[in-house]
Image (cartoon, grey):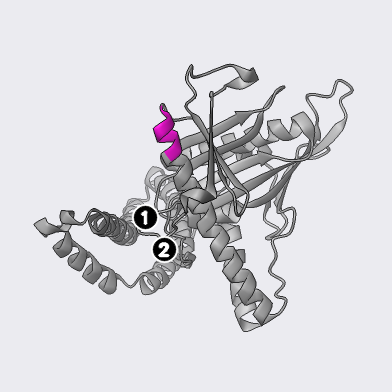
Amino acid sequence: MATDFTQEIKDLRSTMASVREVTDLAKLEQQIAELEEQAADPALWDDQERAQQVTSGLSRAKAEHDRVTGMDTRIDDLEALVEMGQEENDAETLAEAEKELVTVRKAVGELEVRTLLAGEYDERAAVVTIRAGAGGVDAADFAEMLMRMYLRWAERHGYPVKVLDTSYAEEAGLKSATFEVDVPYAYGNLSVEGGTHRLVRISPFDNQGRRQTSFAAVEVVPLIEQTDTIEIPENDLKIDVFRSSGPGGQSVNTTDSAVRMTHLPTGTVVSMQNEKSQIQNRAAALRVMQSRLLLLKKAEEAAERKELAGDVKASWGEQMRSYVLHPYQMVKDLRTNFEVGNTSGVFDGDIDGFIEAGIRWQIAQGKAAAEG
């Protein structure tokens, strides 16, 4: 069946009209002008925190503006390509237009989802921690598979990732790992990945070839910024130093540079070993600790609001996604019912469909709770 380019382009323009309405380009342009004026003030850098706030705000505003206006240009270019192919009855040009349509449609969909991210911390970078759960060596292996999945997802999008800590299991895989995805809206996107993930497969570690179910937990917190007010009294922190280790207990650093930081009032623990010095690991650990305590504080506030409002059934549940490799191949999100059969693609980082469905589900849950 031939593609109805006219209708497709009309739909794309309609979606972009909604995106522009939510984005409010006129307001964004005014914000950019104001921030540029502030950034041009030589006295701005007398206040380092204020300067960082202005420059990062300007960078985000410009990126958001370019993202929207750039998409309008891509749709215009696609329309011109279609017209040229149709006028000259050129099958090759129309095939190229078909290919570009798929790419643009996906990009517009991602942009539409971006406009749904309006949470307090959605614009932030993200700190992701993966921990092996029940299932022994299979769970540790699963944790490493998830780690690779998220790193490949970031690589596909060109997002910078910094691995902050890795704790290897004795036989195979990871006990836990923490990494940072440092791009705007990383938290808004990845926050929907938080929860318990389940893997069902024939265990490669079972010599009888039995089916094994294993679990891993994914935690996502927004990266703390210098302008956030999370003060941690020194007496509330216990800091231990130890020697970094690699797979199988192999030492990767001959000095006691790794840091384990414990927040005594909450029992929150952060370990860092991937920086070169103890000072760097302490600074990285403190930043992640602040991020976790910030989210904990917000969760407590949300719990209080929920208690006042009564029981709102918007829980993500104990298990949010299943990865089944045997007796059939399927990855299914149990909240959104989004599923795919290409399990190898998912483990290779193709998870945008799950993230988009998760964001739309989360927004719908929020609206239902507000109306309830």
Q: Is residue 281 above or below residue 10?
A: above
Task: Say whether residue 109 is left or right of residue 167.
Answer: left
Nearest the viewer among 112 and 359 is: 359
Q: Which mark is residue 100?
A: none
Three-letter amino acid code at disc 1? Val
Q: CA distance from mark 2 to mark 1?
A: 10 Å
Quadrant for residue 124, please give it: bottom left
Q: Residues within 10 Å of mark 1 (few under 14, many from 20)?
A: many
Three-letter amino acid code at disc 2? Ile
Q: Residue at x 24, y 68 (%)?
A: 31
Task: Say whether residue 130 is left or right of residue 96.
Answer: right
| Secondary element type, mark 1 | helix
Nearest the viewer among 90 and 32 is: 32
* Residue farthest toward the bottom in the current orientation of the protein: 371
Nearest the viewer among 192 and 265 is: 265
The reply to whether the C-beta atoms of the residues labelled 2 and 1 are less than 8 Å apart is yes
* Residue farthest toward the left in the current orientation of the protein: 42
At which x and y percent is residue 195?
A: 66, 52
Q: Is residue 103 magenta?
A: no
At which x and y percent is residue 196?
A: 70, 49
Magenta segment's dominant SS is helix
Q: Residue at x 54, y 65 (%)?
A: 298
Task: Say whether residue 47 is left or right of residue 283.
Answer: left
Q: Which mark is residue 9?
A: 2
Q: Nearer the viewer, mark 2 or mark 1?
A: 2
Label located before the other in sequence (2 or 1): 2
Q: Is residue 344 visible?
A: no
Quadrant for residue 238, please give it: top right
At which x and y percent is residue 85?
A: 35, 51
